[in-house]
Image: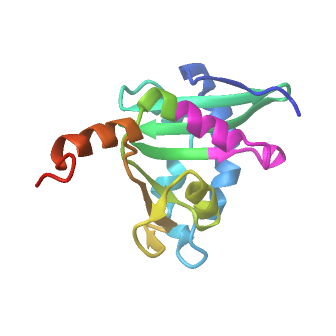
Amino acid sequence: MQDITLRDGVAGDANALSALVTPLARHLLDADTGGNAHAFQASLTPACFAERLGSPHFAHYLAADDTGLCGMLAMREGSHIHHLFVARNAHRRGIARLLWEHALRIHGRREYTVNSSEIAVPVYERFGFVAKAAPQTVKGVRFVLMERPRLVPRVVQKQYLNGILPQGGQA
């Protein structure tokens, strides 16, 4: 297995991100209404990636191996996965998990959301997400709204419960 390097995305990555994501994003388009997804498709241009890379509302994390860029995760407002894509030739190498765990280390234990493609639902379920609605299509893009609840460390839970529950059988 090749070594994977993780790093933050920078403005100079816009062309490479567009080239990675655009062909992979086709599976998000609804077969019947995907022609109406002009706004989504326009958001995948290098100019749109450059705008997001420069925005304080987005964080981009990139994975690269010795062949180049092989995955990316874009987080909006620190709690919504805007994009998570892994190059086809890099699937089943744990890259999506590496990117997700990297984002978790940075953004912490909080609630997260994602509009997942139907084929990516099992991946997000392994990350602790649950579907909050049936698959839907909005402006030609088909997705499943998913949420990952905020994780509370067990120590905090125990301390909290000890503070509110009676001790030694006292009521």
**In this rendering, is residue 10 above or below 46?**
above
Q: Quadrant of residue 79?
A: top left
Magenta-highlighted residues: 85-103
Task: Report the front residue among 89 and 2.
Answer: 2
Task: Report the front residue among 74 and 168.
Answer: 168
Q: Looking at the image, what colour scheme do you see?
A: rainbow
The residue at the far left in this view is: 171
In the picture provided, is 105 more to the left or to the right than 24? Answer: left
Q: Percent from the top left, x then y, of residue 69?
A: 73, 31
Q: Percent from the top left, x then y, of residue 15?
A: 64, 31
Most prominent secondary structure in the magenta stretch? helix
Q: Percent from the top left, x then y, of residue 48?
A: 49, 37
The residue at the far right in this view is: 1
Q: What residue is at 59 percent from the left and 45 percent from the top?
A: 84
The residue at the far bottom in this view is: 32
In the picture provided, is 159 more to the left or to the right than 131? Answer: left
Q: What residue is at 28 percent from the left and 37 percent from the top?
A: 159
